[in-house]
Image (spheres, helix red, strand yellow):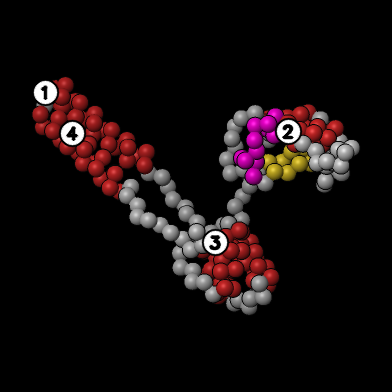
Amino acid sequence: MQLGCPTEDENDKAMTVDALKEEILVNSNENTLLVFPEAKRLTTSIRYWLEDMIAAGARVVCFTVANPGRDIFLDMLEIELELPSDRHIREVMEVEAQKQGLQISKSRLAELQPLAGRNPMLARKIIKNEALGLKQEKPEHTQYVVIMPIIIALLMSFGIVRFVGMGTGNKSLYIFGGVTLVAGMTLKQLGSVRGARKRLGQ
């Protein structure tokens, strides 16, 4: 509809997806711009259709957290967007507060801003929660380094020690490596235990 293409056939029936794609392709040119906010969700058939759209001269903009590295994404220019600044996040929160009719001080904004990190959507949600009087204590976003590969590498090194002890006939190395490996795997499994987690609204 935004491109001015018909969505119904001559019998006033809704066109099928394939018919719509063909209609859009016929009416596209170098002035056509298609924007996909969540390109990772595009199906295979849509991605193949987009190849024809690009060949017809249309411009395609895809937003995604990580480049999938397949079909149409291989031909696209990759531009990494900078994270929003703290100032921008506060401006988003101020605008949302005005929409909610909420009078909020700058000091309170400074307290709430870290809860959103660099995510404008979380910033709006936090202000909505504030307007409802909901208690907000911890950030909803997570920023951490995954150290699991390091732990696995350390455990494997103890396995190597065990095999060295076995090969050289050194019982001390064999026992130390074996016990340490088993103890490490046990601690790893215990560390992965999680209790039931339930969030409000779910």
Q: Main secondary structure of the magenta part?
A: helix
On the picture, is 171 further left or further right than 35? Answer: left
Q: Secondary structure at mark 1?
A: loop
Return the residue at label 1: 169
**Callout 2 touching callout 4 (CB < 8 Å):** no
Q: CA distance from mark 4 to mark 1?
A: 14 Å
Per the rendered image, the range of residues in magenta is 38-48
On the picture, is 144 further left or further right than 16? Answer: left
Q: CA distance from mark 3 to mark 1?
A: 58 Å
At 33% from the left and 47% from the top, the residue drawn is: 192
Instruction: Measuring from the top left, give residue 87's x and y in whole percent.
Output: 61, 63
Return the residue at label 4: 178
Q: Residue furthest top?
A: 167
Instruction: Measuring from the top left, give residue 9's x and y in whole percent.
Output: 86, 38
**Callout 4 touching callout 1 (CB < 8 Å):** no
Q: Residues within 10 Å of mark 2 (few under 14, many from 20)?
A: many
